Amino acid sequence: MPKKTIRVGSRESVLAVEQTRLVMDTIQKAHPEITLELVTMKTTGDKILDKTLDKIGGKGLFVKELDKALMDGRIDISVHSLKDMPMETPDELPILAYSKRGNPFDCLVLPKGVDQWDKTQPAGCSGHRRRVQLQKLMGADIPIKPIRGNIHTRLNKLDNGEYGALILACSGLERVSLSDRIHHIFTLEEMIPSAGQGILAVQGRAGEDISWLTGVDDPISRIQAQCERAFVRTLDGGCSSPIAAYAQVHGQEVLLTGLYCPESEDVCVIDRMVGTVDRASQLGESLAVELKSRFLCGAVCENGGE
C-alpha cells in the first residue's frame, strides 16, 4: 500500500519554514507511515514591506495565498503563527490544531555588542499594540519607528544603525536559534502580548479525516487561543487597534488579562477576569464587553480600577 502524502503549506520566510517544520516533525514522530511534503509560497503581506499592515489590508494578507492553495487542493494543511491570522476564519477552512505554546512574551533586542538602549535612537515596533505599551512603560516621548520585514531583515536594520532597539516576539527568535539576541523579556505587567502569540495554528479543509493531527493539538493552547481570540474578536480588533490578550490556565480556571485602546482615544484600559476552561470563549467576550463599556460610559481608568 502506498504511503499517505500530506502537503504542508508555509510562508517562505526562514521563521515560517522553521515553525512549519516543528509541526511536521510532531506529525512524523506520531505517524512515521505518512510522507510529508513542504510547499512554500510568498504571501501578499510578505511582498509589501513599505507600508504598515493596517494600511494594506491587515493580517489576512499573510494567509490569502495559502487559503487559496488549500481550496484548490494544492496543499492539505497550512501552518501559521496564530497571532498573524485574522480573527475570523472561513467555515470551510477551520483551524484544526493549536501547537504547544512557545514563549508568549515580547522582548527588547539591542544592536550587536550594545548593552544599553540609546534612547535617542528609535525603537522598531511593528504594531500599535507594542507602541502604546512601550510608551506607557518608557514615556510618551520615547522615539518609535515602524518596521516591517522578516526577522533577519529587521535585525540587519538594527545592527546597521537604523534603530536603537527592536521589540520582537521571544518565540520567533527562539525558534530560529537567536535567543542570544534577547536583551530583556517584558513581563506581563510591562507588555501584554498579542492574542495567540507563541502558538502555531494548523489550518485545513472542513470535513476531512484529521486523526493524524491529534499529536499536534495542545489542549491548553486551544483554551488560550479560544479565550484570547474571542476577546479581540468581540472588540472588532484588527492590526490598527491596540488590543492585547493573554490567558493563563490553572487547572479548571482561566485568568485572562486584556488591554483595549480605541484608535480615537489616547488612553488604554487594562483589566483581568477569571472564568472556567469550558467557557473560555465566553470569558474573552465578557472581558471585552466590560472594557468597551468603560469607554462608552466615559469611565475610563488606565489601570482597570485596580
Image (cartoon, grey):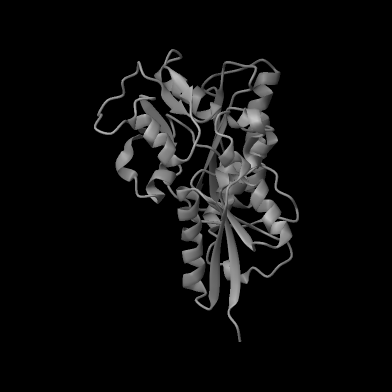
Vertical comparison of 304 with 298: above or below? below
Residue drawn 53% across the image and 58% down it = 218
Residue 33 in the image, given as x and y percentages of width and height? 53, 78
Residue 60 in the image, given as x and y percentages of width and height? 66, 41
Residue 305 in the image, given as x and y percentages of width and height? 54, 22
Vertical comparison of 143 with 158: above or below? above
Would you say 290 lies left or right of 109 here? right
Vertical comparison of 207 with 131: above or below? below
Depth check: give the residue in front, 51 or 106.
Answer: 51
What residue occupies the far bottom of the structure in this picture?
1
Residue 110 occupies which quadrant of the picture?
Answer: top left
Residue drawn 38% across the image and 47% down it = 174
Residue 151 in the image, given as x and y percentages of width and height? 44, 40
Residue drawn 33% across the image and 44% down it = 179
Residue drawn 64% across the image and 63% down it = 76
Q: How many marks?
A: 0
Answer yes or no: is residue 284 visible.
no
Would you say 256 lies left or right of 139 here? right
Answer yes or no: is residue 203 visible.
yes
> Can you say which quadrant of the picture contains the N terminus?
bottom right
